[in-house]
Image: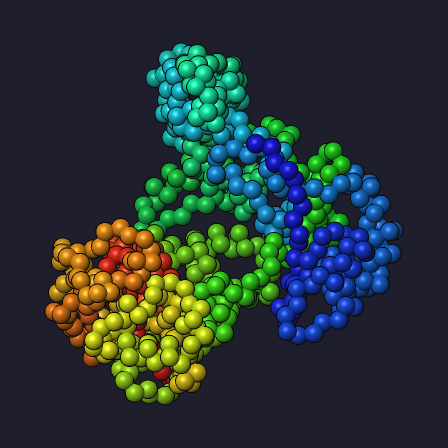
Amino acid sequence: MKNNTTVPTTYIPLEKFHILPVTGLTPQNLKYSAKKIIKDREKISTTTRLNILAKSLGIKGGFANFANEFEEKLKPFMVKHNLHKRVNLLEHKYRGMQLGYAQFTHQQVSERLFYSKGQMPSKLFTGHDFDFSGVLAWDMLELNTALEVDSDWESIITNDIHLKVFSDGYDITQLNERQQQLLSQGLSAKVAFKVVDKSSLPSFIDLITDDEAQDATSTAVKHKELVTTAAELILIKNHNTVSSCYNLLGDNLCDTYCYGPDSEVEVYFEEGTLKSEIQSIKKQMEFFSNVLNEWLQASDCGWVNVIPYNENLIFLSDNSGNYDFLIKNQRDKVFSHQIYGDYLKRADIPSFIEDYRFKRWEYFNYKGNRELDSHLAEQHYYANGGLTKNYPGQHVILQNYYETSGDYITESRSSNKRLHGFKKIKLAEKELMVSELITIDEINDFLHKNHEYFATRKGDSLPPLNSECDKGLAATCTFYDVLAYISWAEKETNVPLRLLAYDEYLAVRDNEVGKSAHSNKGSDMTFHTSDGRQYPGHPPYMNESDFDALTLRFPESLTNFEKNGLEFIDSNFFAEWLLEGVSIRSASLTSFYDDANVLRASGPRDCTGKYKGIKTGFRLCYELSK
C-alpha cells in the first residue's frame, strides 16, 4: 500500500522541563519554534529560546549569527548536495505485512548516527521507498504454495540448506544434481514461480454485495509469473529470526557493513545456556545478517545518503532532490508528565514510584543511543541471572542498567521513625518496617478524606468489593488506588512509604506457601446480588454495569497464617499488590494468572481481580535508616 509522506515535528528538550518544537531550518522556522515552546513552570525568554535553537543546530554565536550562517553557508551547502524538498525519508511508502521490518523514528536514526562509535556511514537503509508489499509480504502459506511447483527449491528452502552449509559445513553431495546446481548459484539465484494474481480476485466487499461475483469466484482466479531470489525466499522462511538483525544497533543496515562486533543482533541467552548452543545460534545470526545486508545492498531503493553539516546537524537525502534532517539529542514526542494517563494525577504519584523520575530524567537529561542502551541492558539482565519467565519489562531493566553504569542514581528513601502497627523485618542488606494488610476501615477513611480522588477514579467499583460486615478485613483495591493511598499516607506520616518488592515479599514469607496453595477448587470468594442472593459459582456473562454492582465477599471460613510476625490470608483467590505493579496470590505465591511468572504475568492495574473471583489488597513498608 502506498502512503502519503508526512514530515513529523522534531522536539528539543531544555532545562527546567521546557520543550522546543522544530519544523524547519530557516530563521523564520526557528522564530516560529520559539513561539510554540511547550513551557513548564519556570520562565524562559524568547531570546534564550532562539539562542538554544541555534546552539542545538551547531551554530556558534547564538541566533544573532544564525541568519548569516543560513544564507552564507547552510543554503549553499543544501544546493551543493541537491537538498531541495523536505520529505520524511524514514516513512515506508510501500508497506507489507511482515512486522519484522519496522519503520524507524527520527530519534532512533539521530541517536544511531550521533551517539555511536566508529565510522559514520555514507549510506543508511531506512526502507523509505523499498517495496515491502511484494514477495516479502508473503505469509508461510503463500510461500509453501509457491514452493509446491518446484520440489527442488522446496526442499532447499524448507530445510534451510543454505544455512546448514554456512553454519555446519553441510555435505551437499547428498543432494541431487539439480539441487547442488541451484545452491552453487548463491543467494542471488533467480527463482520463477506461478502465483495467484490477487488483483484478479473479487474484493471482500464484492463478495458480500454481488451474487454474480460469488458465482464467478471459482473461475475468476488467474495466475501470474513472479521472479524472486533465493535470498528473498530465505528471509521469508525465517522472517521471525531475521527481524533480530534488522536494527540500528550497529552497522547492520549501513554501507559499511561487515559482520563482526559492530553487527549487533537482538538475541539473548540466559545464564547457564550451553556454549555450543550459543555458538550455533550466533553462527545462524551471522548467516541471516549477511543474507539481509547482501539482499538490501543489491537494491538502490530504501537507501538514503548520510550528509553531515556539522557536529549537530545531519541531512539525509535520496537521489531525487528530497531531503530530511536530524538534530543531535532530538526527541520524537512531547514528554507527558501524566505517566498514568487519566488514572492518576501527577500530585497523587507517591515518592517511591521511580518510573516518573526516571522517565523525566531519560527525556530531559540523558544523551545517548537508547536503542543500543536497551540492547546492552538486555544482555546485562540475562548475564546477571535474569530469567525470561520473570522478565520485569524493558523500562525496568533499562533503568537497572543505567543505575549499574552510574548514569542514573535513584533517590535513597528511608526513615528512622517506628510507625505503630509495623513489624521490623531483617533482610540480607536492610531492615524493613512492614505493615499488616490495609483494612476496609483504613481505605474508607482515605476515600472519605479524598473526595476528589474518589469522584474521578477509574476501575472496578470499590464499595461492592469492600462490603464486608467486618471492616477490619483486608481492603480490595486497584493498583492506582494503592498509589493514591500511599501518596496520601506519606503526607500524613512524613515517612517514605512503599510496597514490598517481589524478592522482599518472598523473603518475608521465607518462600513458604499456605495450606490452600494446591487446592483445585474454584474461587472461595462469593458473589452476591444487591438483594442478597449468592451465586453458586462465578456469575454468568452480564453487562459491565450489572457485574460491577455485584459484591464479592470473603468466605466465612477464611483463615490466616503467620510468617515473621505478619498475618497472610490463606487463599489462592486473595492477592497482594507488589512494588513492580504486579500482584501475587497469597497462598500459592503464583501470579495473577496462577503461574510461576509473577513479574511477567501481570493482571490489569485498573482491576482488582474481581472478574476472576480474586480480591487484591496491599500492605505498606518502608526502609529503616542505617
Q: Where is residue 496 in the image (x, y as percent from the top left)?
A: 41, 80
Question: Residue, x 48% and y 19% (percent of image)?
Answer: 201
* Residue at 38% in and 63% down: 459
Above-or-below relation of 301 to 466:
above
Question: Residue 428, how many percent across, how many down?
Answer: 30, 74
Residue under the point 42% across and 76% down: 451
Query: 14 or 568, which lies in front?
Result: 568
Q: Which residue is depicted at the point 87% across and 51% down? A: 72
In this view, the residue in front, 313 or 475, is: 475
Q: Which sits in the foreground, 125 or 42?
A: 42
Q: Is 302 placed above or below 476 here?
A: above
Q: In which quarter of the image is residue 609?
A: bottom left
Which of the colour schemes (rainbow, by chain, secondary structure, one colour) is used?
rainbow
Instruction: Place residue 32 in its image quadrant.
Output: bottom right
Q: State which quarter of the image contains the N terminus.
A: top right
Relative to residue 582, is residue 118 depicted above or below? above
The quarter of the image holding the C terminus is bottom left
Relative to residue 501, is residue 314 drawn left or right?
A: right
